[in-house]
C-alpha cells in the first residue's frame, strides 16, 4: 500500500451513492471544527479518527483504521432538546449503515465494521451525529538491511 490514507477516497466514493440525501458530502479535520463551520444541511463529513493495533509484531502489524462519519442536520423550530434533529437524522443514519456496514473498500482492506463513536452534540439548532467505522489492514515494514 503506497498511501496510508487510501481508504478515505474509497469510502468517499461509496458515499456518493447517498448524494440525493445530503446537500454536502465531504471530509473534515475534526468534530470540533464542524461546530464552527457546519455548512449546508443535511451534511455528511468523513474524518480520520486514528488507529488501533490489532495484532502482529516485527515487520508486520495489523491495525484497525478508524473513520468517523458525522451526520449534521439543522432544525430552526426547536434549538434545545434535539428531538426534531433526531427525527431528520435517524433515516439518514440508517442509510449510512446500509451503504457502509460490511462494505469492503478494496482487497487490501477488511470490510467496514462499527466501532464506538462519541455521543451526539447539539449546538445552536444543529445536531451532530457521529458514527465510527473501522477497516483492518496490514502495515509492512522494511524487509532486511
Image (spheres, rainbow, N blue to C red):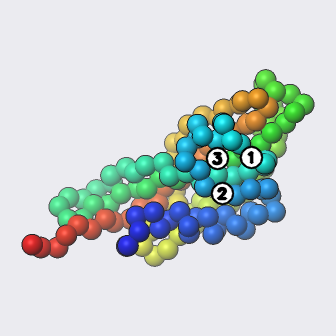
Q: Residues within 10 Å of mark 2 (few under 14, many from 20)?
A: few
Answer with mark 2 or mark 3, whichever residue precedes in sequence.
Answer: 2
- Front position among marks 1 and 3: 1
Horizontal placement of 34 versus 51: left or right? Answer: right
To which residue does mark 3 refer?
70
CA gap, disc 1 to disc 2? 10 Å
Does residue 112 appear in this view?
yes
Q: How crowded is mark 1: few (under 14 residues within 10 Å), some or many (20 or more)?
A: few
Helix, strand or loop status at disc 2? strand
Q: Which residue is drawn at 33% across and 52% down?
A: 53
Horizontal placement of 89 versus 113: left or right? Answer: right
Horizontal placement of 64 versus 15: left or right? Answer: left
Which quadrant of the figure has residue 81? top right
Horizontal placement of 79 versus 30: left or right? Answer: right
Answer with mark 1 or mark 2, whichever residue precedes in sequence.
Answer: 2
> Residue 143: x and y, percent?
17, 73
To which residue does mark 1 refer?
39
**Outermost right residue:** 77
CA gap, disc 1 to disc 3? 13 Å
Q: Which residue is drawn at 74% across and 56% down?
A: 24
**Circle 1/circle 2 CB separation < 8 Å:** yes
To which residue does mark 2 refer?
26
Amino acid at each position: 500500500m503506497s498511501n496510508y490514507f487510501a481508504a478515505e477516497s474509497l469510502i468517499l466514493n461509496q458515499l456518493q451513492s447517498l448524494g440525493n440525501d445530503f446537500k454536502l458530502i465531504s471530509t473534515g479535520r475534526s468534530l470540533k471544527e464542524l461546530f464552527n463551520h457546519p455548512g449546508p444541511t443535511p451534511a455528511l463529513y468523513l474524518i480520520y479518527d486514528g488507529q488501533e493495533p490489532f495484532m502482529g509484531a516485527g515487520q508486520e502489524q495489523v491495525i484497525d483504521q478508524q473513520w468517523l462519519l458525522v451526520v449534521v442536520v439543522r432544525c430552526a423550530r426547536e434549538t434545545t432538546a434535539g428531538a426534531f434533529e433526531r427525527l431528520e437524522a435517524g433515516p439518514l443514519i440508517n442509510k449510512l449503515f446500509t451503504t457502509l456496514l460490511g462494505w469492503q473498500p478494496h482487497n487490501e482492506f477488511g470490510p467496514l465494521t462499527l466501532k464506538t463513536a462519541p455521543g451526539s452534540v447539539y449546538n445552536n439548532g444543529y445536531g451532530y451525529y457521529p458514527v465510527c467505522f473501522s477497516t483492518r489492514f496490514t502495515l509492512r515494514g522494511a524487509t532486511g538491511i
